[in-house]
Amino acid sequence: MKRVMMTCMGAAFALSLVLVAGVHAEKPAHAYAGTKTCKMCHSKETTGDQFGIWEKSAHAQAYAVLGTDAAKAAAAKLGLEGNPQELGECLSCHTTAYGVDAAQIGKRFSVEDGVQCEACHGPGEDYKSMKIMKDPEAAKAHGLVVPTEETCVACHNDKGPTFKGFDYAEAWKKIAHPNPAK
């Protein structure tokens, strides 16, 4: 009887440690909300139509382009075997959130959206609310990233098979999306 009681007490103690650890576990990094979430507030002409600018950009087509014959040839030239839309070497720059924990991916996020807003501005689940976005410092505190040239050259560099140079100032002109109201 004593042995059974000790076993039960040991199991209860182990369970309590698991429960306490779960309560005090570190919160995962900010989660990715996806472009559909960004679109809700960033698609009006009066505020700059940032979503429309992105939607017409090469960034929006970055995942789709991996399905082309040209992408398959570029991957083969690098000695990569398989579908570029499934290769980490390609997905790391042609998609957003490649390699992050699945717990950080929101319900409205879609890898098919390519290089989305959050690739440059950071995972948006925690800064997406209007209240937070109206306060730039609060938005930054909740994960908003103000991209720099270093953000861009993480992918726009000579490691890519089609790289032909990168001029940050010229590239920025193509994707600039300011809010005229600010």
Image: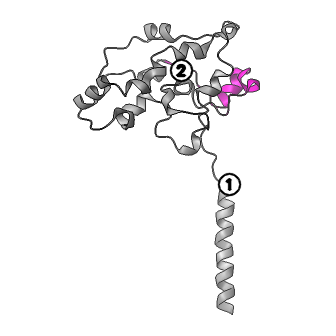
Gap between marks 1 and 2, in whole Å?
32 Å
Q: Quadrant of the N terminus?
A: bottom right
Residue 57: horizontal and vertical position, in percent?
48, 15
Q: Is residue 71 above or below residue 42?
A: below
| Quadrant hosting residue 74 | top left
Q: Is residue 122 above or below residue 31?
A: above
Q: Of helix, strand and loop, which one carries label 2? A: loop
**Residue at 50% in and 40% down:** 100
Specify whether residue 91 is painted magenta.
no
User: In this figure, which residue is indicated by the disc labeled 1?
Assistant: 24
The region drawn magenta spans: 126-148
**Residue at 63% in and 49% down:** 26
Residue type at the position of mark 1: His
Q: Locate residue 3 relative to residue 84 in the image: left or right.
A: right
Q: Locate residue 58 relative to residue 102 in the image: left or right.
A: left
**Residue at 64% in and 9% down:** 48
Q: Quadrant of the C terminus?
A: top right
Q: Earlier in the sequence, mark 1 or mark 2?
A: 1
Q: Of helix, strand and loop, which one carries label 1? A: loop
Residue 6: horizontal and vertical position, in percent?
66, 85
What is the count of numbered marks? Answer: 2
Is residue 154 visible in the rendered image? The answer is: no
